[in-house]
Amino acid sequence: DCFPHIGIPEHRQDNDAEIDAELRAIVEEMELTPSFRALSQFGPMFSVVKALQIAQSGKISEAKQLFEETYEAMIDKEGIRFALGYWVKVLLHNGLYKEATSYQELKIKILENIYSTEINTLRKYIIEIRSRQSYEYIAFQDSLTGVYNRNYYEWLTKKKTNLQHYTLVLVDLDKFKKINDTGGHTKGDEALQLVARHLKYFVHQYPDARVIRYGGDEFILCLPIEYSTVKDAIRALHKQILSLSVTIDEQPFYLSSSVGIGYTETTYSSITELFELADTALYEAKRTRGIIVDHCIQA
C-alpha cells in the first residue's frame, strides 16, 4: 500500500468519529507532502481517501462518484484493498446494501488473487528446490556408498578456487584388490560401504564438510577447517578405519588405509592445488602403507 498506516486492521470496531478523524489526518498528511500530486503512484490513493472523507461528511453521492471513478481508473487495484473495507462500511452505514455487496465481492477477488499468487510462487519455489535436489541426487551421488561422487568433485573444483584455512584429505584403501580377489566384489563393496559410513559420520561434525568417492577405493574429505584444528580428529578417524574388518571365509580381514593431506593456512589456494598436494602426500604414504603424510601449501 502507498501509506502503511492506511492499512488499518479491519477487525477494529472504530466508530464514525474515529474513522473520520483518522481519514482527515491521513488526507492532511498527504496534502502536506511535497510534490505529492506529482507522484502518480500516490495520486489514486489520495482520491480514495478523499472519497472516504467526503462520505463521512454525509455527501454520499459525491463520494460514490469519486470512489468509483478512481477505482475504475486504477491499474493496480490491490493497492486499495484496505480502503475497500472502509468503503463497504460506509455504504452499509448509508443503507446501500447492493453497492456494499458488490464492493465486498471485489475485495474478496483481490484477496483471492493475492493468496493465489503467493501460493503459486511458493509452489513454484518448492518445485524448483525439489527438482534441483533430485538432479543433484542423481548427478552427484555415488550409488554404492551414498556419498558424493566424482562429478561433484569436478563441480567443486570450479566453485572453490580461492581458499584459506582449508584441509583436503585423500583416503586410499590398501590391499583392496586382495579383498576383491579373495572375497569377491561383494566383499569389496561391503568394505567400501563400511569406510564410507565412518567418513560420513566424521564430516557431519563439521559444517560444509563433504566426503567424496573419487574413484575405486579412494575417498576425498573436503574440510573448510584449519588443519591444526582437525589434525587430531583425522588421526583418530584413521585409527578407526584400521580397526574395521570384513569377514572372508569366516575370518576377519582388517582394512588398511593410507592418507595424504594437503592444506592451506593463510595462503590462498584452490581445491585442485590442494588435491595435487594431497596426492603427492598419499604417494609417499603408500610407500609404507597405513600411515598419514601431510603437506602444506607454501606462499
Image (cartoon, rainbow, N blue to C red):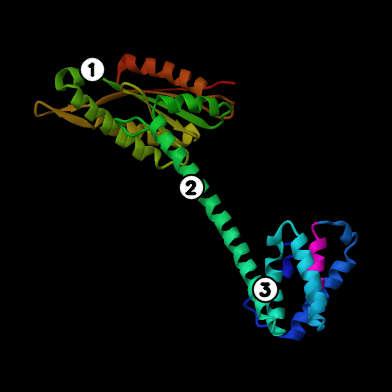
Prevailing SS of the magenta stretch: helix
> In the image, is residue 275 above or below residue 16?
above
> In the image, is residue 292 above or below residue 110?
above
Tell which of 138 and 89 is nearer to you: 89
Give the distance between the C-alpha atoms of the residues marked 1 and 2, in whole angstroms: 45 Å
> Label 2 belongs to which residue?
126
**Badge 1 local density, few (<14 within 10 Å), some, or many (20+)?**
some
Amino acid type, callout 1? Lys
Quadrant of the rendering where the C terminus is positioned: top right
Which residue of the protein is positioned furthest toward the left in this rendering?
A: 250
Query: Which is more foreground, mark 3 or mark 2?
Result: 3
**Badge 2 local density, few (<14 within 10 Å), some, or many (20+)?**
few
Residue at 82 percent of width and 81 percent of height: 59
The verdict on residue 151 being magenta is no
From the top left corner, tell me how far across and down residue 97 is, in percent. Answer: 66, 80
Quadrant of the rendering where the N terminus is positioned: bottom right
Decide if residue 244 is on the left or right side of residue 12: left
Residue at 31 percent of width and 16 percent of height: 288
> In the image, is residue 35 above or below residue 279?
below
Asked if residue 249 shows in the view, the reply is yes
Q: What stretch of residues is rendered in magenta?
A: 41-50
Residue 177's label in the rendered image is 1
> Label 3 belongs to which residue?
85
**Mark 1: secondary structure:** helix
Residue 149's label in the rendered image is none
From the top left corner, tell me how far across and down residue 241 is, in percent. Answer: 28, 31
Quarter of the figure with residue 215: top left
Give the distance between the C-alpha atoms of the residues marked 3 and 2, in whole angstroms: 33 Å
Amino acid type, callout 2? Ile
Quarter of the figure with residue 66: bottom right
